[in-house]
Every structure is written in C-alpha cells, then in structure tokens.
Image: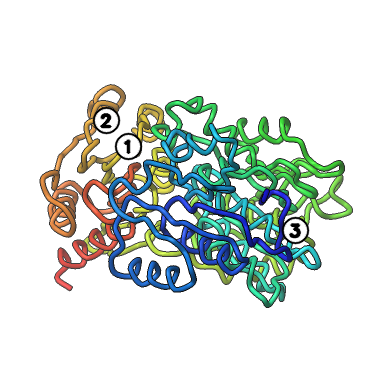
C-alpha cells in the first residue's frame, strides 16, 4: 500500500513502516503510526535503557517490532512501504540509502505530521527556522498567539513532537513550529501559512559535507518558504534570507515581509528610536507605522533578542493578531534558561550564561550585546570557523578563556585577528562541573570591574557535557561557588 495516498482518516492497515531512530520524535512517529493501524518496526543503534526501555515496552505491547542496539540499523527489512527518519540521521546513512535505492519514501516526523492533519479543521502552521534564535522566536510567537486567546502550541524542534500535537483529539487553532535544517531536509509537502528564516550562518557543516556544504544547508533552510500562502518573513540584514524568499515557489498573493533593527521601509517591521513598529500590516503603511511595543518592554535589549521579537511579531501579525496582543505577548515572554541569563554579579563583574550559543553566529550576536567581555568559548566546532567572529568582536574582548576539544580552532582565529587579546586555556582535561570550576577561576582572574564574563561557547557541548543545558548549569554553579553562595 502506498502511504503517500493516505491521511488521518484512512486505515493504514497493510502499511509496513520503519521508524529510524528511537528518540522523542521517533517514539511519537511509531506510536501514532501504530494507532493508525500500520505495522511498525523501530530501529536504533542505542540499546533501550531507563525511560527508553519503558517506551520500547509500550510499543511492543501495542504490536511494534523493535530492533535496538549496535548493528540494528545496518539493514533495511525486506517488506517496507515507508521509512520515517529521525532528523539527525544523515541521508548517507546505510538504511536511508537502501530505502532510496528501493524507491521507498523517506519522511521525517514533520512530513508525517503534515500528512496527518485533520482535513476538516487543519490548524495553520507558522514556521520558524534559522541558524540562531529559532527557539526563542517560536516561544515568543506561541506566547503572543496564546495572549490573543488562541489555542496554540510550540512544536517541532521545541516543545511537543509535532505529530503528537497534530493528532490531539482537541483541535488547536494554530501551531508555532520550530524547524531545523535537518527536519526541513526530510520535508516535501508542508505548506505553512507563514514562515520566517531568521538568519543563515555556518553551522552543521559536517552534516552537509556531501550535500553541497553551506549551499546545501541554506537550501534546506529555504524549504520552509515553499508553498507559503500568506507571508515569507526575512531578515533585511541577511541577504541570504531575502534570496531564499525570491527563489521560493509560494502561493500567489503571499507577501515578502522584512524585519530590521533600523527604520523599516514599507512592508517591513523595524525599530524607530526605541519602539518596535509595524509598517507591513496596517492600511496606512505607505505613510506611517504602528507601535507594537518598546524595547524596554522586552526581557532583553540585546540586538538579536529584539530581532527575534520582530520576527515573531511579523508572523503573528500575518495571522491577524492585534497590535495589543503582540505588545502584551512580548511583554509577558521570558526566554528559557541558558540564553543571555545573568547568573551572578560581584565586584563590578557580571557573569552571563549563553550556553545555547552553540555556533559562531550565535556567539557573535551574544558578544555584540556586551563590552568589554571576558569570553568563555570552546567545545565541538562542527566544522565551523571563527575568523569572521573574531574580526567583528575583537575590540570588545578583554580576554578569552578556551576549553573543549576544538579550542584550537578558536585559538588560531584569535592569533590571526586579535593577537593582543590574552588567551587562557582551562579545564580541557576535565568533564562536567570540574571543567567550569577551572574555567570560572581563570575568567575571574582576568575580569576587571565593569566587565562581563560571557559563556557563549560558539560550539556544541557533547565533548565535555551531556548537552548545552548541563554546560550552562555547571557554569552557573561554579559562579555561585566562586561567590561563596
């Protein structure tokens, strides 16, 4: 049976589906396919333990076949109609290559969710991607939508797995959908009502080695604009985002809406003095702009945070949300942990955790919000380079503390472009809390009154920490320990 012909109200009995990867999205895909009547086999190289073991047992009770552990994903079963892959799987993975060679469709969980929308009352998707700021913007948007009285959820790469939300028996009014480039790569029919690409900068280039490198990464980001019916929101300061809009195949009548930290032109949102304004969704846009909120209403005045607010406001306004709801939603929003979070102040030195800055573009945005800075950086660079970042922020740097596996990548960029900035290495032979005790001690020895010590690593964390949150928690704990609390 061809699953491409089936939807939410069809019986999937007879469909043989393989779910590749048994993470959060993989479990959600397998669970919902079973409820639709499909025969499901779930595969993962990792053995089931802890919570994964409980989920595996549940799926087996529901009738799924599980192959978990080393070697489980090397061979695609003989009788398969559909493969649903977790987003982190590269297209070159043996299992996915076998599926393509046999003409079997390969979807991501996002594609599956799109095909399972209720045709009688499909909640529109307002979709967000970009190298940086996706989660903050999506959560801002969800807050605005709920402030407007809509039943909304932040889904996709944040919050609920999107297939779970789509299959909820109580219908939603709208979804705020965060999408990574990996998720977009495996999406082919999604048609968001409105979409935004916040920025495009070097990240995940190791994943795109054989997929066109930076061009392939940007192209996957641009897939979010395909078939948009209302608004393609782009960053005026990022030419790539504008180009992706120009190249997109959209529904006739869809508008290109820019956002800028400067004075907005017609059809844009921007900033006038300290006020966020809309010059796109008002009748008098040719001659005036409507106030949305003041920068002081936001949780942070950092430029990248203001840009995220403008993008969220543009998507909400495109959906018909009032100026008042945008204002109240932005006022109410507070970012999640490890995003430009002050974790300590003593002796005139401010300590800031931005562990979520896991690539150079995010680190640069964070660094540009502070001056002078003792910068804490390092980890897994994922193929990225740091020359542009160092050239841009070198005048702000008091000193740099480096740690992590790829610290030399950053050290070499500093040596080339900021040779006078002191650089210290710390905690490189440690993991977990001990790393940050050494890093924080080194930073304290370099910082002067008026400085900000900023954890904006520009790298992923998994060489020394479970994830970016564990890294940020360790940094905050070490700062508190330093202060004797």
> Which secondary structure lies at badge 1?
loop
Residue under pointer 3:
317
Tell me which label, 2 or 3, sits earlier in the chain: 3
Residue 158: x %, y % from top left: 50, 60
Residues at circles 2 and 3 in contact by the CB criterion of under 8 Å:
no
Query: Which of 301 and 79 lies nearest the eye of the viewer?
Result: 79
Q: Nearer the viewer, mark 1 or mark 3?
A: 1
Crowd class of label 1 (few under 14; some 14 to 19; many from 20; radius 10 Å): many
Residue 314: x %, y % from top left: 70, 53
- How many angstroms separate mark 1 from mark 3 (CA)? 37 Å
In this image, 84 relative to 435: left or right?
right
In this image, 84 relative to 386: left or right?
right
Residue 172, above or below 89: below
Tell me which label, 1 or 3, sits earlier in the chain: 3
Query: Which of 464 and 281 lies nearest the eye of the viewer?
Result: 464
Quadrant where the image shows the C terminus: bottom left
Residue under pointer 1:
381
Residues at circles 2 and 1 in contact by the CB criterion of under 8 Å:
yes
Residue 107, above or below 407: below
Label of residue 409 in the image = 2
Would residue 213 be seen by someone viewing this image from the given angle?
A: yes
Query: Which of 125 and 119 lies nearest the eye of the viewer?
Result: 119
> Which secondary structure lies at badge 2?
helix
In this image, 268 relative to 75: left or right?
right
- How many angstroms separate mark 2 from mark 1 (CA)? 8 Å
- How many angstroms separate mark 2 from mark 3 (CA)? 42 Å
């Amino acid at each position: 049976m061809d699953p491409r012909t089936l939807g939410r109200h069809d019986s999937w009995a007879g469909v043989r589906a393989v779910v590749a990867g048994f993470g959060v999205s993989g479990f959600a895909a397998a669970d919902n396919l079973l409820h639709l009547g499909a025969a499901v086999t779930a595969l993962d190289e990792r053995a089931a333990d802890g919570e994964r073991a409980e989920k595996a047992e549940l799926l087996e009770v529901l009738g799924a076949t599980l192959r978990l552990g080393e070697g489980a994903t090397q061979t695609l079963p003989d009788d398969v109609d559909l493969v649903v892959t977790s987003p982190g799987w590269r297209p070159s993975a043996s299992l996915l290559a076998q599926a393509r060679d046999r003409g079997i469709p390969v979807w991501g969980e996002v594609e599956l969710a799109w095909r399972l929308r209720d045709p009688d009352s499909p909640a529109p998707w307002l979709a967000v991607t970009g190298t940086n700021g996706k989660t903050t913007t999506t959560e801002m948007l969800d807050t605005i939508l709920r402030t407007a009285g809509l039943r909304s959820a932040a889904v996709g790469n944040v919050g609920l797995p999107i297939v779970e939300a789509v299959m909820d028996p109580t219908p939603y009014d709208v979804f705020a959908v965060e999408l990574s480039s990996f998720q977009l790569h495996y999406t082919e029919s999604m048609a968001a009502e409105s979409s935004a690409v916040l920025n495009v900068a070097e990240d995940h280039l190791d994943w795109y080695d054989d997929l066109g490198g930076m061009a392939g990464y940007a192209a996957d980001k641009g897939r979010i604009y395909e078939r948009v019916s209302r608004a393609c929101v782009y960053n005026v300061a990022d030419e790539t985002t504008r180009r992706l809009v120009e190249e997109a195949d959209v529904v006739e009548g869809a508008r290109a809406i820019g956002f800028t930290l400067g004075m907005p032109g017609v059809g844009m949102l921007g900033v006038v003095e300290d006020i966020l304004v809309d010059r796109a969704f008002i009748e008098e846009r040719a001659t005036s702009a409507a106030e949305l909120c003041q920068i002081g209403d936001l949780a942070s005045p950092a430029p990248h945070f203001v840009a995220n607010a403008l993008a969220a406001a543009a998507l909400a306004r495109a959906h018909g949300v009032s100026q008042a709801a945008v204002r109240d939603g932005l006022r109410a929003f507070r970012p999640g942990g490890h995003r430009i979070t002050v974790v300590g102040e003593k002796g005139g030195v401010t300590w800031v955790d931005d562990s979520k800055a896991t690539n150079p573009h995010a680190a640069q945005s964070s660094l540009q919000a502070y001056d002078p800075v003792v910068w804490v950086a390092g980890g897994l660079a994922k193929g990225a380079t740091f020359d542009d970042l160092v050239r841009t922020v070198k005048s702000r740097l008091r000193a740099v503390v480096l740690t992590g596996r790829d610290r030399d990548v950053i050290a070499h960029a500093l040596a080339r472009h900021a040779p006078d900035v002191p650089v210290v290495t710390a905690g490189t032979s440690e993991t977990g809390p001990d790393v940050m005790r050494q890093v924080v001690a080194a930073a304290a020895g370099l910082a002067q009154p008026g400085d900000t010590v900023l954890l904006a690593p520009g790298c992923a964390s998994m060489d020394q920490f479970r994830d970016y949150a564990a890294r940020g928690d360790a940094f905050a704990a070490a700062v508190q320990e330093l202060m004797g609390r």
